[in-house]
Amino acid sequence: WEELPIGLVESILRQDYLPITSEAEVLTLIAKWIGSRQRREEDVTRLLRSFRKGDSVRVRISDMAALMGALGTVT
């Protein structure tokens, strides 16, 4: 997953019929794409646009840490 180009990851995450049980899984997939690599903030922001806001979405702390780190909000 980490090796896939951003365009492909974005097209997968934007699918209306993505087989996930919660939108939180989209954030998990983005965090996995980030992995241990240094990603451009613009690319992470681009992928975050595929997240659909919903009620009572529970996000794993490790996913939030990866996302915030990639966005430069955590050192």
Image: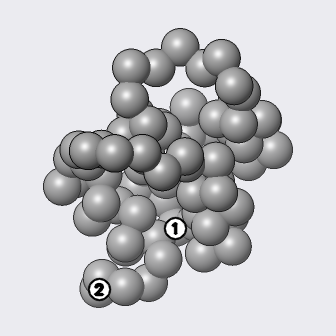
Residue 53 visible, this orientation: yes
Occupied quadrant, residue 14: top right
Q: Position of residue 66 (x, y in %)?
A: 35, 61
Q: Is residue 21 above or below residue 75?
A: above
Q: Earlier in the sequence, mark 1 or mark 2?
A: 1
Contact check, label 1 and label 2, Cβ < 8 Å? no
> Can you identify the residue that label 1 sits on?
38
> Can you identify the residue that label 2 sits on?
75
Q: Residues within 10 Å of mark 1 (few under 14, many from 20)?
A: few
Left or right: 39, with 70 as reference point: right
Left or right: 10, with 53 as reference point: right
Amino acid tagged 1? Gln
Residue pictured at 40% horizontal, 63% vertical: 67
Residue pictured at 46% horizontal, 20% vertical: 20
Residue 4 visible, this orientation: no
Inter-mark Cα distance, 1 to 2: 12 Å
